[in-house]
Amino acid sequence: MTVRVQAARFDPGAELAAFGQGRADIGAIVTFTGIVRDRDGGGLHRMEIEHYPGMTESAIAAIEAEAVDRWALRDSLIIHRYGPLALGEAIMMVATAAPHRGDAFAAAEFLMDYLKSRAPFWKREVTADGADWVAAKDTDEAALTRW
Amino acid sequence: MTVRVQAARFDPGAELAAFGQGRADIGAIVTFTGIVRDRDGGGLHRMEIEHYPGMTESAIAAIEAEAVDRWALRDSLIIHRYGPLALGEAIMMVATAAPHRGDAFAAAEFLMDYLKSRAPFWKREVTADGADWVAAKDTDEAALTRW
Amino acid sequence: MIDVLYFAWVRERIGLPKERIETGAATVADLVAELRLREERYEAAFADLTALRVAVDQQLTGFDAPLAGAREVAFFPPMTGG
Amino acid sequence: MIDVLYFAWVRERIGLPKERIETGAATVADLVAELRLREERYEAAFADLTALRVAVDQQLTGFDAPLAGAREVAFFPPMTGG
């Protein structure tokens, strides 16, 4: 069970390659990678992510602990960046390992839904016109009710 | 959109690293990796997968086409091995890329559910006592009804 | 003449992966009835059709599927890929 | 004395990330009421509480949360990580 909150870039492929190695009881690994996407009309210069040091780590650890409690996870990984990010760069990654696919998928979606709405990160999109804070979606909060 | 049916081993980390590169319209990548897991009581020597050459490729392509039709996928990848596989090796992998996470997760789960029950692969577990065909689970067939 | 393929434990029970069969069977079910009359190993393989799946020309179908024009029929247990 | 932290557009509207405040406020809502009376920039930041979230000692909570013993209160918009 690993949590990393960092400004540095990371390589999702290398993370997956190292994840869940050397265990005979893992049958399913699910990963989610969030990537800096251009605006629908284009024009994104970069993304900036602000976070709440101290609370970020404890909030993510609490979310991860709940996932471990609810599903048969053998391992989990959460990486989330902050600071400036370029178009196409990985923002964050979640990985879950379980004996069966149902637990791995459910836990990964649970982690994503909770990270979206309960971990103290705020995204800002920088364009030629300035910088806009990304608004939370009603659907993000609604997604929590399914768990 | 890529489909590979192969006997050779593959590296899920390298596949993820190469997947969805160079596009500005991808915000979410989900991967599933199926791994040879030991039996609950231990004792697995290896797994063997039989398949139906010709039908395998067309069945997977049809499943992938339906996923592309139903969700806003920007890219997808399906790799499935056959032949002998050692404990801990990757059996198969699915990757989906979409603007938003909901589509990427749903399409990956859909692909997995259909690959399990509609692509012509049969797993056999080899132990010191012989070889047993893995039985399909009722839950695998039931999983299709949610789509 | 039609190619009949067997996979997994169906192949093992019948003892071969593929054979060419001369048949006038109108449907998959008719073909199965013919095969069951041949030898004990076919009877053993086809004893419980609910445990079997069938593909005609590499498309999953039901046992009531017609065989007119078909080149290939395959019998196998439920798939366990993924 | 309590540390009050602001993030994202709350920080921008108030114009600073953190301040130490001498207060006898019993709850978060009481503290917000005090801050709104200070200056226009606080009024602008706290005008719509439904657009804000609050954490006391780094735990998400509601505006009715008590402040007795609290060392740190943070105000911010709904999170947008992931």
Image: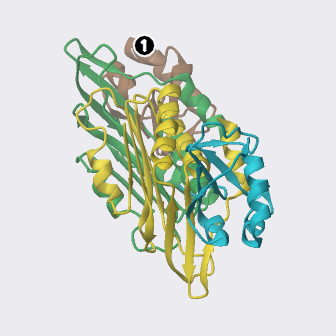
Chain colours: A green, B yellow, C cyan, D brown
Question: Does residue A37 appear to the left or right of B55 in the view shown?
Answer: left
Question: Does residue C10 appear to the left or right of C50 in the view shown?
Answer: left
Front-most of A58 and A107? A107
- B92 is higher (above) or lower (below) than B67: below
Q: Residue at x 53, y 55 (%)?
A: C82
For label 1, the SS is helix
Q: Chain of mark 1?
A: D
Front-most of D39 and C50? C50
Q: Give the x, y percent position of residue A92.
A: 36, 43
Residue B108 visible in the picture: yes
Q: Residue at x 22, y 11 (%)?
A: A129
Q: Give the x, y percent position of residue B12.
A: 35, 56
Task: State how many labels appear.
Answer: 1
Crowdedness of circle 1 by 10 Å Cα count: few (<14), some, many (20+)?
few
Q: Residue at x 51, y 23 (%)?
A: A137
Q: Residue furthest bottom?
A: B128
Q: Residue at x 50, y 47 (%)?
A: B55
- Give the residue pinned by disc 1: D44
Residue D23 visible in the picture: no
- A57 is higher (above) or lower (below) than A48: below
